[in-house]
Amino acid sequence: MTAPAILTVEQMTAADRAAIAAGTPGLVLMERAGTAVAEAIRARFKPCRVAVLCGPGNNGGDGYVAARLLKRRGWTVWVETVGAPATADARAMAAKWRGETFEAGEAGRNADLIVDALFGAGLTRPLEGEAVRLARLSRSMRGRVVAIDIPSGVDGDSGKVRGDAAFRADLTVTFHRRKIGHVLEPGRAACGEVLVADIGLADAAQPLRENGPALWSERFPWPTGASHKHVRGRLAVVSGQQTQTGAARLAARAGLRIGAGVVTVLSPPSAVAVNAAHLEAIMLRAFDNEAQLVEGADNADAVVIGPAAGVTPETRGNLFALAHTGAAMVVDADALTVFRDRPGELFATLDRDDVLTPHPGEFERLFPGLLDGAPHRLAAAREAAVKAGAIVILKGADTVIASPDGRAAVNVEDAPWLATAGSGDVLAGFVAGLIAQGMESFEAACAGAWIHAECARRHGPGLIAEDLPQLSSAVLRDLYAARA
Ligand SMILES: NC(=O)C1=CN([C@@H]2O[C@H](COP(=O)(O)OP(=O)(O)OC[C@H]3O[C@@H](n4cnc5c(N)ncnc54)[C@H](OP(=O)(O)O)[C@@H]3O)[C@@H](O)[C@H]2O)[C@@H](O)CC1
Ligand SMILES: [K+]
């Protein structure tokens, strides 16, 4: 892993704009930012009387969000303004704030905790008037000051104080990456503890990587002497109906081969007999409704849903149900297609450790026009990952793996033998099997995609999907032998 970047204000603004252009509205980013602030405060302070000091820009907008969320949790909160909200997003968030609001200096009471949401990245000149008074006040409130993004008065690009007054905070909650102003004095000391909150932005300059063991082998989840099957991770795979069960079994077998300790096929009643006749080390559980599905997947660390699952409302419902189990989801095939008319519902359900594995046709169904409109499929996959808020494996000869955090990798060696029925089911099983063992989802996606292609290269002509899980043993043996 390379060390995190430190950004200029302009680079941060570019990341912000890129996310908005890719489909995440500014208001959503602001809600995430304010949520991160409220959560950080709740984690560090006991409920008390909080004054949120809101400036006119989007820094103030974050403040209105934090005020609303703390009040909802039962805290005593009021807002003190320095200037009326002047951006559309800040105005919208101010309108959602239903608590007491005063002009700074007019509240006539003291707070136990002050939240500085006066100015952040948009500071253009020295603090004046009430802002100066509040900045001085913050210096006498040790232990009781939280800054949003950066203490007001500190220049984000240099850490210098504009003019002669700036806030001094005990906790600064910033977003996406530290800025220069957080790491250079005197800004650095003015920040106190810096918490960098993820609000779903991508690093524009993240290098693209070749997908290969160098990217992930150090973190491959090899078993240790103390491992037993439960520690090695639990994988569940959802089966299709009676005549469509092979795909799930391929995925399950792949997950078992790649090392998941316990693998279970979750089967509709119609398919239990056929699944039972074909499974040995893999367990089988029947489910007749969403509640039983959730029960069956209860302890799973990862689940595969989609291979021959059926393009039906049941598949949609099953996915929504599994999303609440805490297992990471690898979503493939029918579970992608079934959202073709409502991709937003899928994206709203996904977490950042979930993985989508579309081929170009499925990709087009979920992200209409993106593949044709983007400069290249890497850009399309990256944008898709941000839109979906999940890892995307865009399959093809040049399989691309993209994360919403900006990381991306491409399979560079050809494996034409993979163009065979069922090979995608095996890929889903490999990836989910690695996630089940605790591998981080992007790296699991990269490792799964590379091992999948390497199996095919080793086999060559005549490959069928059934061969792939078995072939992975030799690939794993070589990776194991080559580990440092
Ligand atoms: N980028 C991102 O990814 C995200 C950003 N987010 C948040 O947005 C913040 C940046 O917002 P922003 O650009 O609206 O600037 P902000 O700091 O609120 O101030 C601008 C206003 O203040 C005014 N003004 C400036 N100096 C002044 C002074 N000394 N005294 C008086 N007025 C002064 C200035 O007036 P002007 O210079 O235009 O006359 C303008 O009206 C950022 O820090 C983060 O918290 C998050 O919501 C989520 C994602
Ligand atoms: K601030």
Image (cartoon, rainbow, N blue to C red):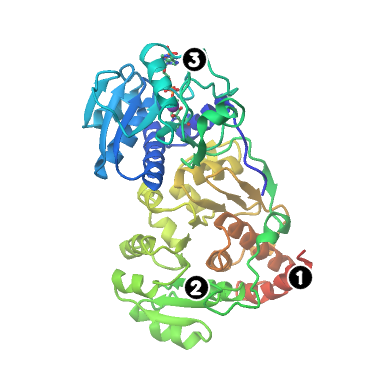
- In x, y percent, where is residue 165? 48, 17
State which mark lies toward you, 3 or 2. Answer: 3
Task: Classify 10 Å Cα crowding around label 1: few (below 14), some (14-19), many (20 and above).
Answer: few
- Relative to residue 455, is residue 437 drawn left or right? left
- Which of 317/74 is in front? 74
Q: Is residue 281 above or below residue 291?
A: below
Quadrant of the rendered image containing residue 243: bottom left
Distance between the alpha carbons at the discs numbered 3 and 1: 58 Å
- Relative to residue 82, is residue 447 drawn left or right? right
Does ligand 1 reach within 8 Å of label 3's beta carbon? yes
Mark 1: secondary structure: helix
- In x, y percent, where is residue 166? 48, 20
Does ligand 1 reach within 8 Å of label 2's beta carbon? no
- Which of 219/189 is in front? 189
Mark 3: secondary structure: loop
User: What residue is pinned by disc 3?
Assistant: 124
User: What residue is pinned by disc 1?
Assistant: 478
Q: Is residue 397 above or below residue 153?
A: below
For badge 2, the amino acid type reads Arg
- Relative to residue 405, is residue 138 drawn left or right? left
User: What residue is pinned by disc 2?
Assistant: 234
Quadrant location, ligand no. 2: top left
